[in-house]
Image (cartoon, rainbow, N blue to C red):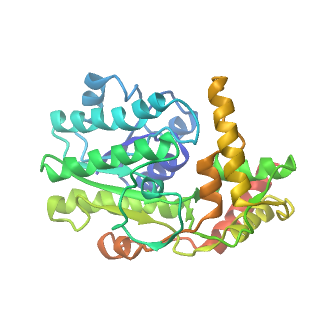
Amino acid sequence: MRVLVTGAGGFLGTAITRQLLERGDEVIAVQRSRYPHLDRMGVPSIPLDLTTDLPKIIDAVKGCDVVIHAAAKAGVWGPYETYRQANVQATNLLISACKQAGVRNMVYTSSPSVVFDGKDESGIDESAPYPEKYLTAYPQTKALAERAILKANASGELVTTALRPHLIWGPGDRHLVPRILSRSKLGKLKLVGDGSNRVDSTYIDNAAHAHILAADLLYQQGHRSACAGKAYFISNGEPMPMRELINRILIAGGQPRVSKTVSPQLAYLVGSIMEKWYHTRNKLEEPIMTRFVARQLSTDHWFDISAAKRDLGYEPLVKIDEGMERLAEDLKLQI
């Protein structure tokens, strides 16, 4: 296939690009700036702004069989408008560009947080509804974008699917793993609650693999494919206590196990106070605690991935044990 990958220079985008290249597909990368590692991979890169450059987006997608839209603004803090532009406006422009360029198939990287209502998610499936309110802009705008993607499929103009990988980690991670290790080294790492809440996570190769499975199905079967117009939770299917997941990452990074805790109620209160304080002072840096983070860290987040197994043929390629061994080796090389 000829595949355009947005956010190809990011953690997930790079993994998707690498797997596509390894099997002989042609990849075109789109992101705001150039990434040397994509140049080394021999991937043609098109630097453009997905929030404004519709004519250039149309030119970029022309002739592509599938678009994998992995670009997004992540995080738990910042002005709503910046998230709306990056996550909603960019997605809408990409949908419009595909329609005008005659590109039929699109796989969208969503997030399980689009259905998070602040309570335990214990083995939920894709029937879980979108909540009426969100605690932060990221899940709200990702939900709006996901809805736009699935609506485009319902209209018959495009064939689309949305994937919701949870807590992606592994070698090359620039977010979850570095944050845990950094806070541990500073002595600021704490569990919210006792860490017994169960969470799913996704090894990077598995998240990329799911995207390629979806892309293949859309390209080969179009609207006849079982995944057309649907969203899917993606994970390793190995839920474990939050405490165990964090400790295994700490051990891989040569750090001591986490021992400090804070109650969920106190964490939520602190998050609320810090949000108000940061808002009144227009501070752009992320607070060390927010209401969303307090809820995320203290509740269950594990999902029924049987739909992805059934419709996509998804099975995790790398188990958590093997993934942690790979992560440990990668972190040793960085020392």
| The image quarter in which residue 218 lies | bottom left
The total of numbered circles placed on residues is 0
> Which x, y percent locates residue 204?
55, 59
Q: Residue at x 42, y 57 (%)?
A: 115
Q: Residue placed farthest to the left in the image?
A: 156
Q: Residue at x 82, y 52 (%)?
A: 184
Note whether residue 169 is visible.
no
Q: Is residue 307 above or below residue 167?
A: below
| The image quarter in which residue 126 lies | bottom left
> Which x, y percent locates residue 147?
29, 49
- Between 8 and 91, the one lying in front of the other is 91
**On the picture, is 320 further left or further right than 187?**
left
- Between 192 and 25, the one lying in front of the other is 192
> Which x, y percent locates residue 175?
64, 47
Q: Residue at x 75, y 54 (%)?
A: 331
> Which x, y percent locates residue 205?
52, 61
- Between 55 and 92, the one lying in front of the other is 92
**On the picture, is 117 further left or further right than 52?**
right
**On the picture, is 321 further left or further right than 128?**
right
Note whether residue 145 is visible.
yes
Q: Residue at x 72, y 63 (%)?
A: 246
